[in-house]
Amino acid sequence: MTVLPITIWGEPVLHRRASEVEVFDDELRTLIDDMFETNDAANGVGLAAPQVGVGKRVFVYKFANDDGAPATGVLVNPVLTLSKISGALPDPDEEEEGCLSFPGGTYPLKRAEWARVTGFDGEGKPVEFEATGWFARVIQHEYDHLDGKLYVNRLLDRYARKAMKQAKNNGWGVPGLTWMPGVDPDPFGH
């Protein structure tokens, strides 16, 4: 298994819809293994293929949950069904998100409290489960990557301005920027 560099906001693959996986083969399984390794090295709770420069509809997660779903898993070609998202303002103490492709920043964001996901594992076998609370947040966050969205694209204006200031100050928003988990300093201080 290989730790892969993580793309940073501005890399084109992060901002376009990923394509469906059509073949479940050794190349896909190697990608999945490398994504698990990269996610672990980055201390992440999830990682989508576009975050390692691959425009395919695949994400991995590692999140202990009370929903009966495996604590570690992969979803290929997932489909998400969500509960309604509250119109209340996000709680800055309880609803902050971060992203490995927007390293170091955390901003409040409202998400649906419940999600049902269907898709496939790395062998092409069907996967289906429900997620609640933070686990639902993780699943929504990674799914967004497959549609070319980062969580900062969903922020309220005041938080979006702060995020864009962070991006500008770091020189992000251009192709070719990455960071290497296990080599570069952990942007979230784990």
Image (cartoon, rainbow, N blue to C red):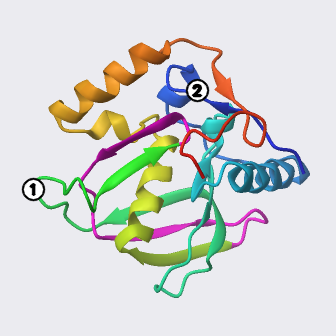
Q: Position of residue 170 (x, y in %)?
A: 48, 17
Q: Which residue is mark 1?
A: 87
20 sits to left or right of 82: right
Instruction: Tell me which amino acid carries mark 2.
Output: Val
Give the residue at x 57% y 46%: 189
Q: Nearer the viewer, residue 155 or 78?
A: 155
Residue range corresponding to the magenta coloring:
100-125
Q: Earlier in the sequence, mark 1 or mark 2?
A: 2
Q: Position of residue 70 (x, y in %)?
A: 62, 80
Instruction: Tell me which amino acid carries mark 1.
Output: Gly
Query: What is the number of callouts on the image?
Result: 2
Would you identify the image quadrant in which residue 182 lies? top right
Residue 13 got which mark? 2
Give the residue at x 78% y 36%: 183
Would you identify the image quadrant in which residue 55 lies? top right
Secondary structure of residue under mark 1: loop
Q: Position of residue 149 (x, y in %)?
A: 42, 36
Q: CA distance from mark 1 to mark 2?
A: 30 Å
Give the residue at x 73% y 65%: 124
